[in-house]
Amino acid sequence: MAFASLLEHVGGMGRFQVASVLLLALPVLMMASHNLLQNFTAASSDHHCRLHWEANATGLDPQDLLRVSVPHGDQCRRFVTPQWWLLEVNGSAPNSSWLETEPCHDGWTYDRSIFTSTIITEWDLVCSSRGLKQLAQSLYMAGVLVGGIVFGGLSDRFGRRSLLTWCYLQMGTMGTCSSFAPTFTVYCLFRFLTGMAFSGIVLNSVSLSALEWMPTRTRALVGTFMGYCYTTGQFLLAGIAYAVPDWRWLQLTVSLPFFCFFLYSWWLTESARWLVMVGKSHQALKELQKVARINGKKEEGDKLDIEVLRSYMQKEMASSKSRHTVLDLVRTPILRRISCCLCFVWFSTSFAYYGLAMDLQNFDFNIYVIQLVFGAVDIPAKLVSILTITFVGRRFTQSIALILAGLAILANILVPRDLRMLRTALAVFGKGCLAASFNCVFLYTGELYPTVIRQTGMGLANTMARLGSITAPLVKMVGEVFPALPFIIYGAAPVVSGLVAILLPETRDMALPETVEEVEGRTKPQKDEAQHLQVPLQPTQPSSSMGPC
């Protein structure tokens, strides 16, 4: 309550908050370009073994030369000797030599009509090496996982703005280095480091934009606005990828803007909440007075001093004297329940999301159109989610979004494969529900954890999400034994996690908790009050259930 009152005192949702949100939103526009980039930089295309001779050397039409050199439909082998008899209308093999084939010792020839260059064509990641394509994406996701662990804890120790500035620089530098990578191994290393920076940007952008400088009444709106920026980024990626079909130039194009973000990030203001938590009250006071001046509340800001700040935030000042670690996420009963439920929600949301959108080329549509469709469904999904988040509650939104997503995936199992449009529509609906779930859980997680361990909690949540994204392709492999099993798992996980989300406390219209004790104390007074009121109000029993869960 204390810091929320201070924010209102220095202008509430004023010019400072609007400017900060806009500056933090610009990098989010480019986040989708990195997270989904390999759909285009690692896109597959038709290919066949490189032929022994060129068409102009033999006088044959290229199609005829391909016919006598490569078995029909085989992308990984070629004939040892040309099978000229295949050119005859009623020709037959003179002997069994037509069965003799060999691997593509001289490399492959690729269809470059859509993608002029990808990492597949650059390093021949086909046939026996085709698994390396998935390895590159897995290593990127592993980087996101490690980044969530590392930067989540570091931002609680060194500050939100400092880590955000560093991650902008790391994202721009590592993304640029990826575009100049001489080998596949070096490329994977740079992608891993890019993934780490991605996590740091997501964690600290959410904290600075939607949580720690925002009044309670506008947190949901700002969080959804940031989500729409990511959605817009998916449209942007489709357009950039269409205009830049070469993977190196595409990688460079989406990386260079982060150097601009790095330069202006020095203007961003450190979280005053965090400054108080680490005992830097004088700096927190300067930041609050700066915000008041920008918001046109200079007189109110000048009235603030250390004594006023301490009187507002006595509990927070006291908590800053104690050290907090990741163990604090499970040390007390309420936080233990919150952490366990959120871990399952984050894992299932990411797991099902990447189970649906693992490879856009699995759809029998133009890859750029599918990218637009998958981005477009986020618009109504997030609009509905912000309405339910604001007017119904976080818990309801989180639970219903996951359950509907799981049911849509499970329903797809019953749809015949020849009904392509219906199957695609169900998949798009499920993806929209998962986008709404992501939109809600980012805000919900930040509201459930207290300031002193908020970034540590966000880091743990991000870790579980990355584990889900890494696990999803492994589960898909079991489809070779039982085709429906992966979709049963993809659908069951969000349904179960949606039911688990019901156990989380509601946070609508509540100020951000500052300390662990405040989180633990939110339910205890309600129970004591219910017991106190139960005797005199026994004839009107519904009165005892007025307190929020």
Image (cartoon, grey):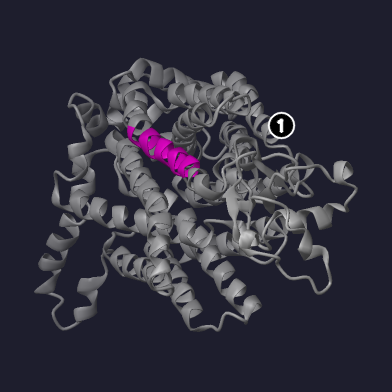
Q: Which residue is more in the foreground, 355 or 481?
A: 481
Q: Which residue is more in the foreground, 371 or 307?
A: 371
Q: Quadrant of the C terminus?
A: bottom left
* Side (left or right) of 112 relative to 385: right
Which x, y percent locates residue 512? 35, 44
Q: Which segment did they paint magenta?
A: 135-149
Residue that appears at 46% across and 60% down: 355
As for residue 148 lying within the magenta part, the answer is: yes
Which x, y percent locates residue 292? 52, 26
Q: Looking at the picture, does residue 303 appear above or below residue 379? A: above
Which x, y percent locates residue 20? 57, 32
As for residue 185 lying within the magenta part, the answer is: no
Which x, y percent locates residue 285? 40, 20
Q: Is residue 261 visible?
A: yes
Q: Is residue 511 visible?
A: no
Q: Quadrant of residue 160?
A: top left
Q: Quadrant of residue 325?
A: top left
Q: Amino acid at mark 1?
A: Trp
Q: Which residue is mark 1?
A: 249
Among all residues in the image, which is located at the extreme top? 282
Residue that appears at 25% across and 53% down: 338
Residue that appears at 30% across and 52% down: 343
Residue that appears at 86% across and 46% down: 58
